[in-house]
Image (cartoon, rainbow, N blue to C red):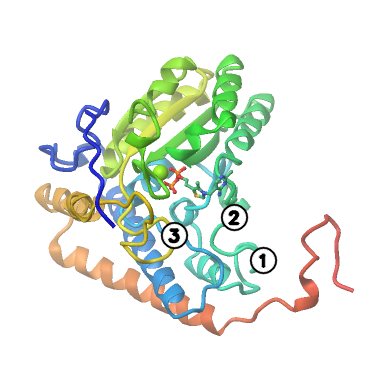
Amino acid sequence: MTDVSVTRASDLGGLANPARPLSPIDVGAYDDATLRHFLTLLFRIRFAEEKVGELVERGLAKAPCHLGIGQEAVAVGVSAALNARDRVFGGHRSHSHYLALGGDVYKLLAEVLGKLDGTSRGMGGSMHLYGRELGFYGSVPLVGATIPLAVGAGIAAQMEGQGAVGVCYFGDGATEEGVFHESMNLASAMRLPVLFVCENNLFSSHLDINLRQPSDRIGRYGDAHVVNTRSVDGNDTVAVAKAANELVTHARNGGGPGLLEAVTFRHRGHVGPKEDIDVGVRRRQSDIDAWKRVDPIPRLISALRDANRMTAGEIAQLEQSVRKEIDEAATRAEAAAYPEERALLDLVYIGGASK
Ligand SMILES: Cc1ncc(C[n+]2csc(CCOP(=O)(O)OP(=O)(O)O)c2C)c(N)n1
Ligand SMILES: [Mg+2]
């Protein structure tokens, strides 16, 4: 298959070009504990997803798994602005969204493996995660489907008057659906406390955004719907955290919804662990290589070291302890029980019980 070059100029002002000169990550505004927390979450999400990839390769995960390796900084930055009273919704690529809110790796891997201890009792797999105690109200595979749910959560939050926000994560592809625009319009007209988070990874499945839309800047939809909008480097955890905090604070204070466009790239194919799986109009290996050079994890590590916020030894120790946590969770999840077959319909209707 031949590589396809898309030559149209980017409207993202360089954010879509990983080869641009990078501004260093500015860790100055955060204390040591917060920065360490950011790095812990980045490691946890990365290693957990690598583990999911292994489980797929070994044939143990039966439901499709969409990995966001390379995109971890978005969920980590956004979650820093949230608390458990907020209501957060994800989509088909949501391992990071669940884990960044404090989700349990064991429950995630158990869900991926279809085990009873999973976040959805093993009934959903990778694309149906749930963690209401964390404020994670669920992810579903239907692209765009959770965007209006976050608007509903925004209406509930506005009625409750406790300063909570509704949040939805979605991709650039989802913005091609009418429901995204209806949701933005209603949230804006009602000045709802909603944060719309677009992980613009420049691809919808195998299709480059430049082949699908007249501009690669999703933020323009915020202009159209009169929504506070920030387009940021989605591989810079601190930039995402700052922008999310601004938009969420504004929304909590009655200033209406926000659209956060975080520009990033996934290292793996659309679905499954392979890099070269994208079919049809395939991604270029040179792009994947270029984006790996702006990987959010080494970038935060360099910034922490340059600012003397963590030593190389502390970082290595943290990495090792997170790897151990993931390995132990995976071993437990592999050994865990499947739900009983007769329980299949128990969760379909409220009050359902196995006979
Ligand atoms: C309503 C709907 N249409 C099509 C699909 C098939 N599908 C699954 S993921 C995907 C691409 C979504 O791209 P994007 O929103 O950019 O998210 P990304 O995969 O890049 O994270 C498509 C078309 C679907 N799941 N739901
Ligand atoms: Mg996309």
Closest to the camera, between mark 2 and mark 3, is 3
Q: Which residue is mark 3?
A: 271
Query: Judging from the image, what secondary structure is the residue with disc 1 in?
Result: loop
Query: Judging from the image, what secondary structure is the residue with disc 2 in?
Result: loop
Q: Position of residue 304 (x, y in %)?
A: 17, 51
Q: Which residue is mark 2?
A: 131
Residue closest to the far front: 1
Residue drawn at x 59%, y 81% as measured from the top left: 336
User: Does residue 136 sit above or below 352 in this rendering?
Assistant: above
Mark 1 and mark 2 in contact (Cβ < 8 Å)? Answer: no
Q: Is residue 9 left or right of residue 104?
A: left
User: Does residue 99 sit above or below 190 in this rendering?
Assistant: below
Residue 312's quadrant in the figure? Answer: bottom left
Nearer to us in this view, 41 or 31: 41
Residue closest to the far bottom: 335
Marked residue nearer the N-terminal end (3 or 1): 1
**Which quarter of the image is occupied by the N terminus?**
bottom left
Whether residue 228 is visible to the viewer of this picture, yes or no, is: no
Give the alpha-carbon distance from disc 2 to disc 3, as whole Å: 23 Å
Marked residue nearer the N-terminal end (2 or 1): 1
Give the alpha-carbon distance from disc 2 to disc 1, as whole Å: 14 Å
Amino acid type indicated by mark 2? Gly
Q: Position of residue 330 (x, y in %)?
A: 46, 77
Q: Which residue is mark 1?
A: 123
Nearer to us in this view, 13 or 205: 205
Amino acid type indicated by mark 1? Met
Marked residue nearer the N-terminal end (2 or 3): 2
Q: Is the CB–ligand 1 distance for label 3 below 8 Å?
A: yes
